[in-house]
Image (cartoon, rainbow, N blue to C red):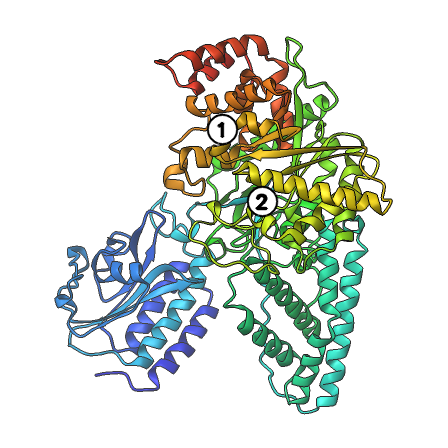
């Protein structure tokens, strides 16, 4: 006998009643499978739960051997149940034993059953288990029965997510939803945060679509828009945001969107056409998403995030759901987890409650990253899948130093990171104590430790880290976070602010290094197969002289009466450099003719990133006042290694002997021609690599501000002369028994140098 069409409705009513009864978890599961079997007139109903070790364990059954509960097991992909779990797809079979995936488990006694219906237990796209019914006679289960079983599976998924089933199996068994998960992402803001997951879910569901009084709805809309604008104005008045910088510029742009008449006009028009205020917001935003979703440009996606954020804030105003997303009484250890997030959304949270931020998307120039850095919040982006894996309240660790996230970390990992936080605090205290100590080796060699920067938010670190200056200011970042081309006056203000912050310390401005993977939304470029080796940096700038001359003019005006250091990126051919020098010369003459105050000294340089320059070093040195080695790109091109390719990036060491010889050749050419040489790149910020550079003869290196303390601590214990002799002996040895790295490690160990 088969169940009639009312069966599924009766089953759902009974399951609701069952969930309200005061039962122990195992008893509740046993009753759930009994009710399903009775309602669907099935001889068997079984429930399997996925464990952290990839095993599906039988947690409850009606009709199979009761003694097999918590004993019967299948691996992912094994048998019909394992196949459902692996594919996250239901199976509806008249003759289960003929299916190629069928596996017989003797302990269950299921060999007599023919029909089989199994559905995955899913939550947020993750498989947590499998729910099965079986019959002795051959039958096909109806769509209503499948839907009913899937609905019950959703109820069971919530039980698993709530931790109700923990401890039902034998000791030591961990459910998949509780297993530790490690994510490799992208470090967007420095720091380490330990806390608990707060899922940022700004999506507001609109259920009331049609209005009965357009005039009243328009009034509601106007009131909500006014409240929205007031909340944004209040945000801009916060003390931690009031200071000038890119974080404020981001929010100023956000405010501009809120006052956009076109946006408000479209909302009002939708209300006049019969929609509620809430439905109008959703319609206008859906229309905008439809227009913009197909665009791959990351900056247009950033604009879309801003409008998504704005629309959701307006919906919350309309529905009366404003206020602190965490709650005033919550503990101050929230780690926000989100797919993406608007900068203003971050400011809805109280700063004293937030320990970190994890994003599935996001990059260095994403608006929320810029604001988080200004607030000192550790951020990891590109943590793919973290939203579907995380549950509210899960323990989580954000490592903004390494770009790593630990979700539900084991106790030993938590202890390690708790120790790291304390160690980091002690280490930072030690580095602060070294801030004003001269960066001088034990044998009296002064080393200029410069920092890399690109935004105003970076500048406070100049003094805090005790940097000797800015060895690389990435001017393109201002262009990358802007929705339109920055005006000459805006560029000039930025460059003047950088020089003011440096307070007489040297600043080296790199001209626009855009193109490749650094795409500007307002600068059309054709797609390239290999953008890193394509139309970028100086190659692009020389083809757009108006763009480059505007930037050079802003730099010259900003440095009035001060020293100006300008370097050109990605120089491949000396003719490119001559053309760039000619452009700045023409701008200098133009501004002089109109009586502008010029820099008291102008120094021009080139970045050595392309290996072809290694064979024209002396000619290059005749055209510049200084050179800076871009070690990241130079090593990538030198070794034919894609740094973003995890399969090969770890195979090749930038402390290889051939690369060290290439760097030494550049140093020697600089010395022959009285041209200073600096190295900018990741290797400058690693103590062992910085030690190698000092051993080669570098006296100026540029790194992230957080690396200055560790590098200074290392060099204070270093005898540079002895190291130089060791390094040169190794480079001269054509058949070395050790790698260059091993030579350095041995030297550090013998001389008790901290790396």
Q: Name above or below for residue 651 compared with residue 713.
A: below
Q: Can see residue 699?
A: yes
Q: Position of residue 131 (x, y in %)?
A: 31, 66
- The C terminus: image quadrant: top right
Q: Position of residue 222 (x, y in %)?
A: 76, 78
Q: Name above or below for residue 301 compared with residue 706.
A: below
Q: Closer to the camera, 22 or 396? A: 396
At label 1, counting other C-alpha atoms closer than 10 Å, the crowd grade (few under 14, some 14-19, many 20 or more) is some
Q: Position of residue 18 (x, y in %)?
A: 43, 71
Q: Position of residue 343 (x, y in %)?
A: 66, 56
Q: What residue would you read off at disc 2? A: 538
Q: Residue at x 41, y 47 (%)?
A: 179
Specify the quadrant of the image occupied by residue 639. top left
Q: Closer to the camera, 301 or 63? A: 301
Q: Can see residue 569?
A: no
Q: Residue at x 53, y 11 (%)?
A: 723
Q: What residue would you read off at disc 1? A: 614
Element assignment for label 2: helix
**Residue 407 relative to residue 481: left or right:** left
């Amino acid at each position: 006998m088969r169940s009639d069409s009312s069966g599924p409705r009766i089953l759902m009513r009974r399951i609701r009643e069952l969930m309200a009864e005061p039962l122990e978890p195992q008893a509740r599961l046993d009753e759930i499978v009994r009710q399903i079997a009775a309602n669907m007139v099935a001889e068997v109903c079984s429930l399997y739960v996925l464990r952290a070790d990839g095993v599906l364990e039988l947690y409850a059954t009606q009709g199979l051997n009761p003694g097999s509960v918590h004993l019967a097991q299948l691996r992912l992909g094994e048998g019909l149940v394992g196949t459902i779990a692996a594919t996250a797809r239901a199976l509806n079979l008249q003759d289960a034993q003929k299916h190629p995936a069928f596996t017989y488990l003797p302990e269950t006694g299921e060999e007599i059953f023919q029909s089989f219906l199994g559905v995955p237990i899913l939550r947020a796209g993750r498989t947590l288990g499998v729910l099965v019914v079986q019959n002795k006679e051959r039958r096909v289960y109806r769509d209503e029965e499948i839907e009913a079983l899937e609905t019950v599976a959703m109820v069971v998924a919530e039980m698993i997510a709530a931790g109700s089933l923990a401890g039902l199996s034998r000791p030591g068994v961990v459910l998949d939803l509780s297993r530790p998960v490690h994510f490799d992402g992208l470090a967007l803001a420095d720091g380490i945060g330990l806390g608990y997951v707060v899922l940022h879910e700004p999506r507001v569901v609109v259920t009331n679509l049609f209005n009965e009084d357009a005039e009243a709805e328009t009034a509601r809309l106007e009131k909500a828009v006014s409240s929205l604008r007031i909340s944004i104005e209040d945000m801009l008045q916060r003390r931690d945001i009031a200071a000038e910088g890119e974080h404020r510029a981001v929010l100023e742009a956000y405010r501009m969107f809120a006052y956009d008449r076109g946006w408000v006009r479209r909302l009002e028009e939708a209300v006049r056409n019969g929609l509620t205020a809430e439905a109008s917001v959703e319609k206008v935003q859906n229309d905008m998403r439809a227009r913009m979703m197909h665009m791959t440009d990351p900056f247009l996606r950033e604009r879309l995030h801003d409008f998504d954020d704005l629309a959701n804030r307006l919906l919350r105003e309309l529905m009366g759901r404003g206020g602190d997303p965490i709650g005033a009484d919550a503990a101050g250890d929230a780690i926000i987890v989100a797919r993406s997030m608007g900068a203003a959304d971050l400011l809805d949270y109280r700063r004293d409650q937030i320990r970190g931020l994890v994003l599935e998307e996001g990059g260095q120039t994403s608006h929320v990253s810029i604001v988080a850095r200004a607030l000192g919040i550790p951020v990891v982006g590109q943590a793919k899948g973290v939203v579907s894996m995380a549950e509210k309240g899960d323990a989580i660790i954000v490592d903004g130093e390494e770009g790593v996230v630990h979700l539900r970390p084991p106790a030993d990992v938590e202890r390690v990171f708790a120790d790291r936080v304390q160690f980091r605090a002690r280490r930072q205290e030690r580095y602060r104590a070294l801030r004003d100590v001269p960066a001088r080796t034990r044998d009296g060699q002064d080393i200029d430790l410069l920092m890399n920067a690109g935004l105003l938010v970076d500048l406070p670190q100049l003094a805090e880290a005790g940097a000797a200056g800015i060895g690389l200011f990435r001017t393109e970042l201002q262009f990358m976070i802007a929705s339109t081309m920055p005006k000459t006056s805006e560029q000039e203000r930025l460059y003047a602010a950088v020089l003011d912050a440096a307070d007489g310390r040297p600043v080296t401005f790199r001209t626009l290094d855009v193109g490749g993977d650094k795409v500007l939304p307002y600068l059309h470029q054709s797609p390239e197969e290999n953008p890193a080796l394509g139309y970028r940096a100086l190659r692009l700038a020389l083809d757009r002289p108006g763009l480059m001359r505007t930037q050079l003019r802003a730099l010259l005006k900003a440095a009035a009466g001060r020293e100006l250091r300008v370097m050109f990126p990605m120089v491949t051919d000396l003719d490119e450099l001559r053309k760039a020098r000619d452009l700045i010369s023409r701008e200098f003459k133009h501004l002089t003719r109109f009586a502008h105050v010029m820099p008291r000294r102008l120094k021009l340089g080139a970045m050595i990133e392309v290996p072809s320059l290694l064979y024209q070093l002396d000619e290059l040195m005749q055209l510049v006042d200084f050179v800076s080695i871009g070690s990241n790109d130079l090593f990538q091109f030198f070794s034919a290694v894609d740094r973003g390719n995890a399969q090969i990036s770890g195979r090749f060491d930038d402390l290889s002997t051939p690369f060290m010889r290439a760097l030494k050749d550049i140093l020697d050419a600089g010395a022959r021609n009285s041209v200073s040489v600096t190295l900018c790149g990741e290797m400058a910020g690693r103590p062992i690599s910085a030690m190698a550079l000092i051993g080669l003869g570098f006296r100026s290196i540029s790194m992230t501000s957080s690396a200055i303390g560790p590098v200074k601590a290392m060099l204070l214990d270093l005898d540079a002369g002895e190291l130089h002799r060791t390094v040169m002996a190794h480079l001269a040895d054509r058949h070395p028994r050790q790698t260059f790295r091993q030579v350095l490690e041995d030297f550090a160990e013998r001389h008790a140098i901290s790396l």
